[in-house]
């Protein structure tokens, strides 16, 4: 259904279709479409039946995600530095995948007009919060801006950024699941809280993964092997970096500051050393503990639902306890 939504663009331009369809195709071919899966399970946790009825909305939340990823490519240079033509295509793809997501929702005949309107409103809210998070990520949650701040102030700014770029969207998706299931306000609120906590944990896990060296070869549908260490090379503050700045040795702190200053010119050998520093000084472990904490809080939000209905949704938090990124980083420990 995701690719079917993009297919009409072929009639306009093969080039346009190729530019827009890249990420939707990768999402379709991926082993799991996390946001669609979460929406379905939030819907079923709240008592919804016949998830096929909401399949167009499941596809829509994946297209909305593609829009966010296309835009993030411009800000973070995901997949490498791009020229003006490539940047322009990413911006066009971001706009079109967002429009196609909304079209899917509006054409969902199995859903009431009132619910369709509310879902579009929630997607709009997610867009605004995402843009706010991206602004924080690029302009405020940086070493250049926050380098002299206290540990608690850095953490606070970083968590605002995490909420904006990821957790808020998880929150809205779970709210949509409750809405489509016709759940009472209390249950929908619990699902929203679950989504927010899970989204915070998942983004921290993603930030930890940024320190996995490229030779480990870990990729996803939106993250290339060579995207590793890109956060610190862009001067962005994530939990491991914040911990090192305030709790690392002078030598470790100086090395990290040097990367913030030199950015993309930093040799890979020095980036690997930063990862080793963060493993050895407890920075990675600190971030992992925070991710696990958000996972526990997420599971707590589901206690009011029957076990058989909450089981699959609750299991989504398990990956925050153990995953391939954590395992790869442990290999670097001295």
Image (cartoon, rainbow, N blue to C red):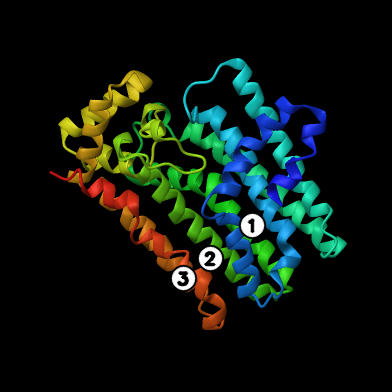
In 3D space, how far apart are the residues under numbered discs 2 and 3 (Cα atoms)? 7 Å
Q: Secondary structure at mark 1?
A: helix
Q: Are marks 2 and 3 in contact (CB under 8 Å)?
A: yes
* Residue 266: x %, y % from top left: 30, 21
Between 133 and 86, the one lying in front of the other is 86
Q: Residue at x 58, y 62 (%)?
A: 38
Determine which residue is flagged by label 2.
194
Secondary structure found at label 2: helix
- Quadrant for residue 333, please give it: top left
Q: Which residue is mark 3?
A: 299
Q: Is residue 146 visible?
A: no
Residue 260 drawn above or below residue 166: above
Please determine whether, in this image, residue 256 is positioned above or below residue 1: above
- For residue 172, the mark is 1
Q: Nearer the viewer, residue 322 or 301?
A: 322
Local crowd size for mark 2, using a 10 Å CA cut-off: few (<14), some (14–19), many (≥20): many
Q: Which mark is residue 81?
A: none
Q: Quadrant of the C terminus?
A: top left
Residue beneath the point at 84% across and 54% down: 107
Q: Residues within 10 Å of mark 3 (few under 14, many from 20)?
A: many
Q: Is residue 154 above or below residue 309?
A: above
Of mark 2 and mark 3, the one earlier in the sequence is 2
Q: Is 152 placed left or right of 170 in the picture?
A: left
Q: Earlier in the sequence, mark 1 or mark 3?
A: 1
């Amino acid at each position: 259904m995701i690719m079917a939504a993009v297919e009409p663009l072929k009639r306009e331009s093969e080039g346009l279709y190729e530019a827009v369809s890249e990420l939707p195709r990768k999402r379709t071919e991926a082993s799991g479409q996390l946001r669609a899966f979460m929406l379905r399970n939030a819907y079923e946790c709240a008592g919804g039946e016949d998830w096929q009825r909401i399949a167009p909305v499941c596809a829509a939340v994946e297209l909305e995600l593609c829009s966010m990823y296309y835009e993030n490519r411009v800000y973070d240079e995901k997949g490498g530095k791009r020229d003006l033509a490539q940047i322009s295509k990413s911006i066009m793809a971001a706009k079109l995948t967002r429009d196609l997501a909304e079209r899917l929702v509006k054409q969902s005949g199995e859903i009431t007009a009132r619910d369709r309107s509310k879902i579009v409103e929630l997607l709009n809210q997610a867009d605004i919060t995402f843009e706010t998070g991206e602004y924080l990520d690029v302009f405020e949650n940086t070493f250049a801006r926050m380098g002299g701040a206290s540990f608690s102030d850095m953490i606070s700014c970083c968590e605002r950024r995490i909420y904006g770029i990821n957790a808020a969207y998880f929150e809205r998706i779970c709210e949509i699941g409750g809405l489509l299931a016709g759940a009472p306000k209390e249950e929908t609120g619990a699902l929203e809280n679950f989504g927010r906590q899970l989204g915070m944990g998942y983004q921290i896990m993603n930030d930890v993964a940024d320190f996995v060296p490229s030779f480990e070869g870990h990729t996803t549908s939106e993250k290339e092997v060579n995207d590793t260490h890109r956060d610190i090379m862009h001067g962005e503050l994530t939990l491991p970096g914040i911990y090192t700045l305030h709790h690392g040795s002078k030598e470790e702190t100086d090395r990290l500051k040097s990367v913030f200053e030199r950015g993309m010119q930093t040799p890979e050998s020095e980036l690997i050393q930063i990862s080793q520093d963060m493993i050895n000084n407890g920075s990675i472990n600190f971030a992992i503990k925070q991710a696990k904490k958000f996972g526990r809080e997420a599971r707590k939000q589901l206690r009011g639902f029957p076990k058989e209905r909450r089981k699959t949704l609750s299991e989504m938090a398990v990956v925050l306890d153990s995953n391939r990124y954590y395992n790869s980083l442990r290999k670097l420990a001295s």
